[in-house]
């Protein structure tokens, strides 16, 4: 299905090559079920564990797909003026059966520890973003709307409050994203991150975790018992 999605994306670019377009491509790989093409699997004989090898073969297909899309943009003369954003929706899941999938971060998909929510964001736009630019700070998926609208020169709606930030100024100059407060919630499981402070509050189990990610990015030292004032503030 990875190759199918790639072919459909290339076809969509071809159909819209003479006008501005927006393409949202949500690859399934490397989500479960872990399934790979035999020729991709056979290329990775140096990986002895079967599960690891299938997972790696899925990543090979994903990389190939991204490369084909980039090649199509270059062929049509669109690459320099196309903004590409590449990220993941969450960290690896425990049910994949690979213990170190989110190493060195703690937690899995469906938790709000960093292993469940921290993901890289790669951006490419040769006309606006200098190669090799690195941006510090916290970006979120809710920033994509404002960023895409800015890239397209489209006005944002004014009849509602928007939480997302336009990241283009940061991406194009390398300036850090300003400190911000962001929230997550899933039922009775609630989290707030304010700057480098992060508080998680859970009903099952009934407890809280407090971490300072500047000093403890892998969330090994729970400060909730020794810093009740910060817990109350957050």
Image: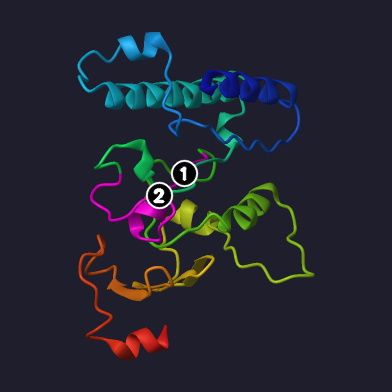
What range of the chain is rendered magenta?
102-125
In depth, the one of 30 and 124 nearer the eye is 30
Residue at left 26%, top 69%?
214
- Return the x and y of residue 149 as percentages of the image width and height: 68, 52
Left or right: where 68 falls relative to 135: right
Above or below for 233 versus 176: below
| Percent x, y of residue 49 | 22, 23
Q: Quadrant of the N terminus?
A: top right
Real-space Cα separation, disc 2 to disc 1, in angstroms: 6 Å
- Name the residue that disc number 1 marks: 88
**Residue 225 in the figure: left or right of residue 139:** left
- As for residue 142 lying within the magenta part, the answer is no
Give the camera-side residue of 218 and 94.
Answer: 94
- Crowding around mark 2 (Cα neighbors within 10 Å: few <14, some 14 to 19, many 20+) is some
Is mark 2 in CB contact (under 8 Å) with mark 1? yes
In terms of depth relative to the viewer, which is nearer, 65 or 69?
A: 65
Instruction: Specify whether residue 122 is painted magenta.
Output: yes
Horizontal placement of 151 versus 176: left or right? Answer: right
**Residue 197, above or below 46:** below
For image coordinates 68% across by 38% down, the residue present is 22
Identify the disc placed on residue 45: none
Residue with the mark numbered 2: 119
């Amino acid at each position: 299905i990875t190759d199918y999605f790639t072919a459909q994306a290339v076809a969509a670019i071809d159909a819209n090559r003479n006008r501005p377009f927006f393409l949202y491509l949500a690859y399934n790989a490397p989500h479960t079920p872990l399934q790979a093409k035999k020729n991709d699997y056979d290329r990775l004989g140096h990986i002895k564990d079967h599960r690891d090898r299938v997972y790696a073969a899925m990543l090979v297909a994903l990389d190939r797909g991204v490369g084909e899309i980039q090649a199509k943009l270059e062929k049509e003369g669109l690459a320099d003026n196309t903004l590409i954003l590449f990220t993941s929706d969450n960290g690896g899941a425990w049910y994949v059966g690979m213990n170190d999938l989110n190493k060195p971060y703690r937690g899995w998909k469906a938790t709000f520890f960093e292993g469940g929510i921290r993901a890289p964001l790669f951006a490419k736009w040769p006309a606006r973003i200098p190669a090799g630019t690195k941006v510090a700070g916290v970006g979120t998926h809710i920033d994509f709307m404002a960023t895409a609208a800015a890239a397209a020169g489209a006005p944002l709606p004014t009849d509602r409050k928007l939480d997302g930030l336009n990241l283009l100024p940061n991406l194009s100059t390398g300036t850090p994203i300003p400190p911000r407060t962001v929230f997550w919630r899933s039922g009775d499981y609630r989290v707030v991150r304010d700057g480098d402070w992060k508080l998680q509050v859970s009903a099952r189990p009934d407890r809280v975790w407090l971490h300072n990610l500047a000093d403890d990015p892998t969330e090994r030292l729970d400060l909730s018992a020794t810093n009740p004032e910060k817990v109350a503030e957050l």
